[in-house]
Image (cartoon, rainbow, N blue to C red):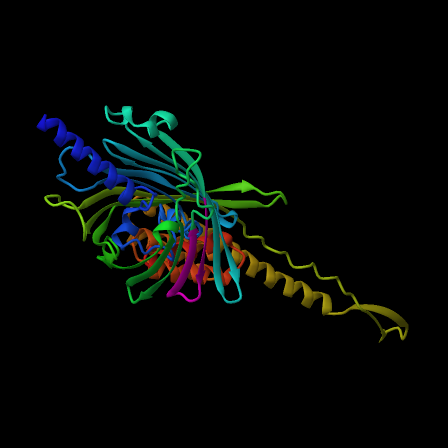
C-alpha cells in the first residue's frame, strides 16, 4: 500500500513539474546559446540560433549542423528527464539560408516534440546590414498512459496528445563591426495547446530584444524577454552572457545567467580542414577560363552546465553535450583575357623631289617617309612587351600550381614561398593573393588571410568568391 501511495505521489509531482516548468516549450535548444544564458537573440550564425531568432541563420557564411543531448536533474530517481535536438541551416549565398530543426523533451510521464522550419536573408542598407527571418513550428505534447490517467475523464475524452502550429519572426541589425542588435517574436499566433477543444491553453507570445558587442576578442551578450501569460500575468526575464576564445579560437570559454539559473560551458575545435582544386574550362566566349573549387569542414564539440536556482534536492543540475559541423563548397570561374592592341595603320607619305643627273635631265623620285618604319619599330617593342608578359604569366601560373601542390601536402611555408614568386612575376594577378589568403586561412592566420583577400578584391572588385571568403573570415574574426 505504501509503495503505491509513494508511486502515485512521485508521478503526480513529476506531472505537475513537467507541465509547469518545462511545458509551454519555454526552453530553446542550442548548447552554445544556453551556455550564454540564453541571450542569443542578437547572435548570428549559430547552428540552432534560429530557434531564438529566425533571422540568425542569415549571418552564417557556411552551412551548419548541430546535434545535442542534455540530461536534466542528473541523479533524479524514478524518471529520465532529458532533452535532445538536431538541426541546422543550409547557406545559399545571396539567396539566403533555410533552417530545419527538431527537438524533444523526454520523460516517463510527459513529452514534447517540436519541428522548426525557417528562412532568413541578409540585406545591405545605408545604416548597416539588416537581416530578417520567418519561422514556423509544429508543437506537440503527449502524456503517458498509466493506471491513473486511464481513469481521468480528461484523457479518456480527449486522448493523450495535442499539436498546434506556431509562427515566429525576427530581425537583426549590424550597425558596426562590434555592435549588433536583435528583436524576435515567438509564438506570434499564441497556439492553443489544450487537450480539450472546448478549452484554451495558449502558449504565451514571447518578445525578445537584445544586443551583442565585441570588445577586443570577447563577445558580450544581453537580452530581455517578455512573455504575456494571460491569466498568469506578464513575465520579464533578463539574460546575459560572455564568450572568450583561447589559443587562436581552438577553445572558447562561455558563461552567463538569467533570472532562473547560472550557466557555463566551453567549445572545442576538434577538426578543421580546407581544400581546393582548379582546372581550365572553355568559356561561352571561346576563351579558356579557370574554375576554382574550394571546400571547408570544421568539427566542434561543446559542453554546457546549467545550475538552476530552484531545483530538486540531491540532483546535479543540467548537462548538455553536442557536436557542431560547419561545411562549405564554393566554386568560381575566372579568366585572364589579353586584349590585343589595334594594329597600326601603315602610313606611307610620298614626297616628290628633284634630282639633277649627270646628263642634266630632271626626273621625279618617290621617297618613302620614315613614319612607317617608326610605327613598325613601335609595334615590335609592344610585341616584345606582350611576349614578356605572357612568359611571366606562364611562369606565375606554374608557381601557383606548385603552391597548390604544397597546399594539399600541408607544406604551407613552401606554398607561401611559391605564391611570393608568382607575385614577383605578376603583381597584378589576383589569383596569387587569393591562393595566399587560402593558405593563411588553413594555417589559422585569419587576419593575414583577410589582408590577402582584400588585396585581391582591389585588383578584381567583381570577384564574388573573394567577397564570400571575406564574409567568412570576418565572421571568424568577430568570434564565430
Q: Is residue 69 among the parts visible in the rendering?
A: no
Question: What is the quadrant of the C terminus in the image?
Answer: bottom left
Instruction: Report the front residue among 25 and 179.
Output: 25
Q: Position of residue 291 (x, y in %)?
A: 49, 44
As drawn, 261 above or below 217: above
Q: Main secondary structure of the magenta part?
A: strand
Side of 391 where 264 appears, left or right: left
Farthest residue, direction right: 361
Tell me what residue is drawn at x 25 percent, y 39 percent: 16
Side of 299 where 436 appears, left or right: right
Which of the 4 image quadrants contains residue 23? top left
Q: Is residue 381 among the parts visible in the rendering?
A: yes
Q: Position of residue 460 (x, y in %)?
A: 52, 59
Instruction: Report the front residue among 86 and 6.
Output: 6
Q: How many marks?
A: 0
Which of the 4 image quadrants contains residue 257? bottom left
As drawn, 264 above or below 23: below
Which of the 4 image quadrants contains residue 322? top left
Instruction: Report the front residue among 283 and 194.
Output: 194
Q: Which residues are magenta?
A: 167-185
Instruction: Report the front residue among 101 and 477.
Output: 101
Tell me what residue is drawn at x 38 percent, y 28 percent: 158
Amino acid at each position: 500500500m505504501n509503495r503505491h501511495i509513494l508511486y502515485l505521489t512521485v508521478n503526480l509531482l513529476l506531472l505537475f513539474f513537467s507541465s509547469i516548468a518545462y511545458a509551454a516549450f519555454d526552453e530553446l535548444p542550442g548548447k552554445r546559446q544556453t551556455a550564454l544564458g540564453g541571450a542569443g537573440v542578437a547572435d548570428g550564425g549559430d547552428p540552432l540560433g534560429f530557434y531564438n531568432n529566425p533571422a540568425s541563420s542569415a549571418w552564417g557564411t557556411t552551412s551548419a549542423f548541430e546535434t545535442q543531448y542534455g540530461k536534466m536533474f542528473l541523479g533524479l530517481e524514478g524518471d529520465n528527464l532529458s532533452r535532445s535536438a538536431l538541426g541546422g541551416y543550409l547557406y545559399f549565398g545571396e539567396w539566403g539560408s533555410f533552417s530545419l530543426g527538431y527537438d524533444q523533451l523526454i520523460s516517463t510521464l510527459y513529452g514534447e516534440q517540436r519541428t522548426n522550419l525557417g528562412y532568413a536573408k541578409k540585406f545591405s542598407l545605408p545604416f548597416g546590414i539588416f537581416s530578417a527571418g520567418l519561422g514556423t513550428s509544429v508543437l506537440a505534447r503527449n502524456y503517458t498512459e498509466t493506471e491513473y490517467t486511464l481513469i481521468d475523464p480528461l484523457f479518456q475524452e480527449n486522448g493523450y496528445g495535442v499539436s498546434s502550429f506556431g509562427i515566429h519572426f525576427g530581425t537583426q541589425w549590424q550597425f558596426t563591426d562590434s555592435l549588433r542588435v536583435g528583436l524576435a517574436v515567438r509564438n506570434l499566433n499564441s497556439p492553443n495547446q489544450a487537450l480539450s477543444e472546448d478549452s484554451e491553453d495558449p502558449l504565451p507570445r514571447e518578445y525578445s530584444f537584445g544586443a551583442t558587442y565585441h570588445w577586443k576578442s570577447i563577445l558580450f551578450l544581453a537580452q530581455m524577454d517578455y512573455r504575456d501569460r494571460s491569466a498568469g500575468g506578464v513575465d520579464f526575464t533578463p539574460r546575459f552572457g560572455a564568450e572568450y576564445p583561447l589559443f587562436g579560437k581552438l577553445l572558447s570559454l562561455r558563461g552567463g545567467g538569467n533570472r532562473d539559473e547560472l550557466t557555463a560551458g566551453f567549445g572545442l575545435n576538434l577538426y578543421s580542414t580546407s581544400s581546393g582544386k582548379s582546372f581550365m574550362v572553355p568559356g561561352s566566349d571561346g576563351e579558356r577560363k579557370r574554375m576554382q573549387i574550394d571546400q571547408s569542414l570544421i568539427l566542434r564539440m561543446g559542453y554546457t552546465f546549467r545550475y538552476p536556482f530552484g531545483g530538486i534536492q540531491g540532483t546535479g543540475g543540467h548537462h548538455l553535450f553536442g557536436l557542431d559541423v560547419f561545411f562549405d563548397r564554393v566554386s568560381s570561374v575566372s579568366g585572364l583575357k589579353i586584349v590585343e592592341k589595334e594594329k597600326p595603320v601603315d602610313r606611307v607619305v610620298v614626297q616628290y623631289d628633284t634630282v639633277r643627273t649627270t646628263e642634266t635631265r630632271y626626273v621625279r623620285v618617290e621617297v618613302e617617309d620614315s613614319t612607317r618604319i617608326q610605327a613598325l619599330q613601335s609595334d615590335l617593342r609592344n610585341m616584345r612587351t606582350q611576349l614578356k608578359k605572357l612568359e611571366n604569366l606562364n611562369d606565375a601560373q606554374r608557381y601557383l600550381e606548385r603552391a597548390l601542390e604544397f597546399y594539399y601536402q600541408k607544406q604551407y611555408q613552401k606554398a607561401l614561398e611559391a605564391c611570393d614568386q608568382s607575385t614577383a612575376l605578376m603583381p597584378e594577378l589576383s589569383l596569387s593573393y587569393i591562393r595566399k589568403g587560402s593558405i593563411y586561412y588553413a594555417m589559422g592566420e585569419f587576419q593575414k588571410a583577410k589582408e590577402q583577400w582584400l588585396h585581391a578584391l582591389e585588383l578584381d572588385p567583381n570577384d564574388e568568391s573573394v567577397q564570400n571568403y571575406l564574409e567568412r573570415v570576418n565572421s571568424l574574426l568577430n568570434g564565430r
